[in-house]
Image (spheres, rainbow, N blue to C red):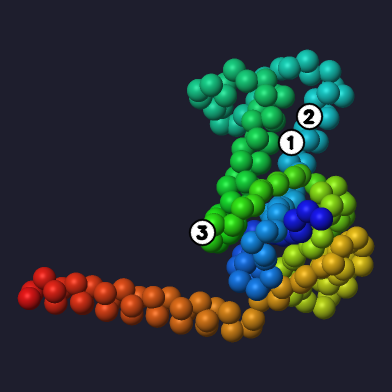
Amino acid sequence: MGPRKVLIAIDHSAESAYAVRWSLAHCLLQSDEVIVLHVRAPTSVFDRYAEEEADEGDGGKELETHPPSRGEDDHMTTQEKIRKASQTYQEISELETHRLAQPLKDAGKTFSIRVVADDKPKERICAEVDEIGADLLVLGNRGMGFIKRTLLGSTCDYCLQHSHCPVLVVKRPLDYHKEQKMEREKEEEERGRGRGRGGGERAA
């Protein structure tokens, strides 16, 4: 039997960041194969523009900008600008995903990052569970209000109903910000004591 595959799905929210840290502290095993997944929104504006240009038989004409841009972008075709914008969006999403996964790296945990574009994140998360053969899905709970939850449905609810593996929903404590503030104050106090001891030693 191989290592357990744990899929941590994040959306760049504070709740997701907490879910990563909580998982590291309470449920991840050293032998686990961890995949951090972010389903970003597709660049739908650019996709629609590309489809419209294709319908009009654009053939690679330059995209007009107002005000006109200067530099290398001046000579790029519409399709090239669309690809560049999409690539930039992907890179930004990957950087932010790496930032939220930093606690795993700091702890020496081996993990991989997966960023995909889909306008149906709930369904895509469940599809990714099946594709990688995840043994556990971890989600952060954003705590949507009743009306929004009723109209849109939550990602957690959907995955609990449709995921083909166990789902762990991590809810951030209500006093989480207070705990963070206390931790920062404690760290600052300890650093202050360290500087004080260092100064005393130099004086001696």
Res. 159 image quadrant: bottom right
CA gap, disc 1 to disc 3?
37 Å
Res. 105 image quadrant: bottom right
Residue 96 visible: no
CA gap, disc 2 to disc 3?
41 Å
> Which residue of the protein is positioned furthest toward the front in this rendering?
1
Say which residue label 1 marks: 46
Tell me the residue at 58%/47% (across/down). Answer: 95
For label 2, the SS is helix
Local packing at callout 1 (Cα closer than 10 Å; few below 14, some 14-19, many 20+) is some
Q: Amino acid at mark 3?
A: Asp
Q: Amino acid at mark 1?
A: Phe
Residue 26 visible: yes
Task: Measuring from the top left, give residue 172's x and y in whole percent.
Answer: 66, 76
Mark 1 touching mark 2, by CB under 8 A? yes
Res. 92 image quadrant: top right
Tell me the residue at 59%/84% (across/down). Answer: 175
Say which residue label 2 marks: 50
Local packing at callout 3 (Cα closer than 10 Å; few below 14, some 14-19, many 20+) is few
Say which residue label 3 marks: 106
> Which residue of the protein is positioned furthest toward the left in this rendering?
204
